[in-house]
Image (cartoon, grey):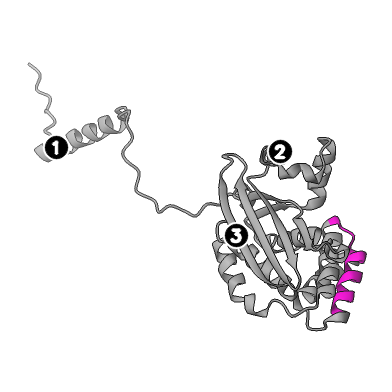
Amino acid sequence: MNNSPRMRVSPSLWIMVFVLCVGCAAATAPKPSSAPPLPSVEPKASTAPLTRLRKTVVVADFEGGSVPPREETAFWNRALASLLIADLRASEQLKVIDRHNLAAILREQQLSASDLSDPATRLRIGRIIGANFFIFGTYTILGDQVILVARMDDVETSQIVKAEQEAGKIDEMRLLSRKLSVAFLQGLDQRLAEREAKRLGAVGGAPLEAVRYFSEGLEYEAQGAFDKAVEMYTKALTLHPKYQEAREHLEKASEQAVR
C-alpha cells in the first residue's frame, strides 16, 4: 500500500490550464482562406503624367485670299495658322503640331499643302502624325472686311467636332482669330477658354503690319530660331508699343536666346 501523500490541485488552477491550452490551439490553427474585407479608402486624384491625358491637334495653313486678289494679303494663310497654334499651345492639355512639322510629313508623303483640301487626305495625314483633331480654315478679304471660317475634325471618327465663322473689319484680324481659338478651346480646355474669353476685350488694336511681324516671330519661335523671333517681336513693338502679346513673347524668346 502506497502511503505517499498525493498532490492536491485546486479547481482554479485546472481552469487556468484549460484556458491556456485553448489559447495555444487558437493561435496555431490555420487561418481561413478568405481574408476579411479591407476598410474603405477614399479615392486619390490621378497621379498620371499630364502628357498621358493630352490631346494632339494639328493646324494647317489657312486657304483663301482677297477679292480682287492682292499679293500683300497672301501672308495671312501662314499668319492665321501661326496665331491659332500659339493660342492653342497656351493649354497644358494640348499638344499642337506646328505647320513646319506638318510640311515635313507632306514632303515625306509627296504631297503639297493644296492636297489637304481633300478630306480623306487630311484625315490620313492626321493619322500618320498621330493627331486626335485636325483644324483647317479659309479667309476671304473683301475690301476692308474679312470672313474667317474654320473647322475641327475628329481624325479617328472623321466627324466634324466644331465649325466656326467670324466676320469683321480686316483691322480686327487678330481679334477674329482669337475668337476662333476660344471657340475651339471650349471643346478641348474649358478653363483656358473661359480665361481667354475674358481677355478678348484687350486683344486687337495693333496695325496689320505689326500683327504680321508678330506672326513671323511666332514661326521663328516654333522653329527654335529665337534670335530671329526677338527681331520680329521687336519690330512689332516698334510699330505698336502697347502690343502686349508681342511683349510677352519677346520676353520668352529673349530668355531662350541667351541660353
Disc on the earlier residue, 1 or 2? 1
Type of the residue with mark 3: Glu
Give SS at disc 2.
Answer: helix
Type of the residue with mark 2: Thr
Q: Is residue 219 visible to us here?
A: yes
Instruction: State which quarter of the image contains the C terminus.
Output: bottom right
Q: Which residues are magenta?
A: 223-237
Quarter assignment of residue 18: top left
Residue indicated by mark 3: 164
**Is 234 covered by the magenta stretch?**
yes
Furthest-top residue in view? 1
Residue indicated by mark 1: 15
Residue located at (59% from left, 39% from top): 156
Q: CA distance from mark 1 to mark 2?
A: 90 Å
Residue indicated by mark 2: 121
Q: Is residue 259 visible to us here?
A: no
Quarter assignment of residue 176: bottom right
Note whether 212 is above or below 6 in the view shown: below
Note whether 164 is above or below 251 in the view shown: above
Q: Position of residue 2 (x, y in %)?
A: 10, 19
Q: Position of residue 128 (x, y in %)?
A: 72, 37
